Image (cartoon, rainbow, N blue to C red):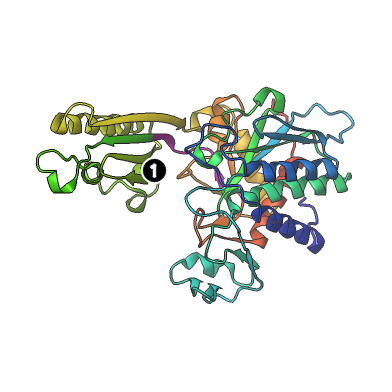
Amino acid sequence: MTPNFNAEWQEKLQTRFLNYVKIFSTSDPESESTPSTVRQWDIVKYIFEELKTLGLEDVSLDENGYIYAYVPSNLENDDEPTIGFISHYDTSPDFSGENVNPQIWKNYNGEDLVLNKVTNFTLSPNKFPILKEYLGETLITTDGTTLLGADDKAGLAEIVTAAEFLLAHPEIKRSRIGIGFTPDEEIGRGAHKFDVKKFGAEWAYTMDGSEVGELEYENFNAAQAIVKIHGLSVHPGYALGKMVNASLLAAEFIQTLPTNETPATTKGFDGFYHLTDLKSDVSEAKIQYIIRDHDAEKFENRKKLITEKVKSFNEKYGEKTAEIEIKEQYRNMKQQFDGKMYIVDIAEQAMIDAEIKPKIKAIRGGTDGAQLSYMGLPCPNIFAGGLNFHGPYEFVSVESMVKATKVILNIAQAKKKQK
């Protein structure tokens, strides 16, 4: 039975989320530290103190910014496994996450939302028809100048609120529940230093999905490719036969990859090359891609293709004109669930019990759960409720966050021991 998560608790959830998104915590792919940005420590310290104040058990914070905490079991004879819930507190570097000013829209009427009266920045169902599915709900949006941070501060708020709810309702019987919060998920390093052994869970769930009902246990294989092109700068008035303009070469290189294999031209299980950043001048150019594919063989072929393009470029313009570095990020976690589909089944039933229709599908992206699954912690992904991530059109429904919290509470009560 889904617990009675009343208006008072909904207000707690909403307030907690609003507090989180106002804390600047964007990660940085150029940094080698963990967390990748000093600013992430602001939200780390805030949540760490919050969890201790709420009375969770064994709350700890390590030198890399990973937070661990537990809701203790209240079973008399507990032979059930510890399970976990995981979220990340960094926000995407794809768009500004500083000075987030969330807007609250109660009883959404299906019309355009002018998020910023100065710039007339508008969130419209004409551009995002999915808005029509949220009629009558309370929406939280940006002010058009930043992203919102529902990815994944909605997940943070849901997990912490569910933990607080369980502690306040001892009549709800549950085994030990682990909580883990990570830095740098948005740059593919969220699970790199996660201490699976210390966490002590038999399996876990990341609360990092999008619309209500999403339940995912397969995802992209992922890598980052960095292509550097070296030019030769001389005075433009005397450049004949001498200048090598790295910016022009970068533009040419970008066109060598398939133009119909980008995020904007693919769907479902299609893979892609995504140009994420380009910095260039006459002397040097740096092109950054993320490479994605669900199929392992196609993924390897993608990495091979871009490497061959660099080789061809050097054959055309001279040795060492271009160089490439490929960094593995995460792998498709599907095979880690062979013989363990009960983990997915438990989450599916928890949604059904909360009157939510499960949408079991592959992630066109990745979560900490992909890496954690390969580290010995099977970890499907569950919706957190936000949409239009990584940009100024991002929004989340309070009602969606409530539904995600109810799913956590239902999983906490499920009989989890498997024969």
What amino acid type should be assigned to the residue bearing mark 1? Phe
Classify mark 1: residues with Cα within 10 Å, few (<14), some (14-19) or many (20+): some
Q: Nearer the viewer, residue 225 or 63?
A: 63
Residue at image position (64%, 55%) is: 21
Residue 387 position by quadrant:
bottom right
Residue 165: percent from left, percent from top: 81, 49
The residue under the point 54% across, 26% down is 374
Q: Position of residue 376 (x, y in %)?
A: 60, 24
Residue 247 x, y percent position in the rendering: 25, 45
In the image, 82 versus 369, the foreground residue is 369
**Does residue 23 appear left or right of residue 337 in this picture?**
right
For image coordinates 19% across by 26% down, the residue present is 319
Question: What is the magenta segment's predominant secondary structure?
Answer: strand
What range of the chain is rendered magenta? 215-224
Q: Residue at x 83, y 29 (%)?
A: 78
Q: Is residue 414 above or below residue 356?
A: above
> Magenta segment: does it hold 106?
no
In the rendered image, which quarter contains the C terminus? top right
Disc 1: which residue: 269
Q: Is residue 292 left or right of residue 162?
A: left
Label 1 element class: loop
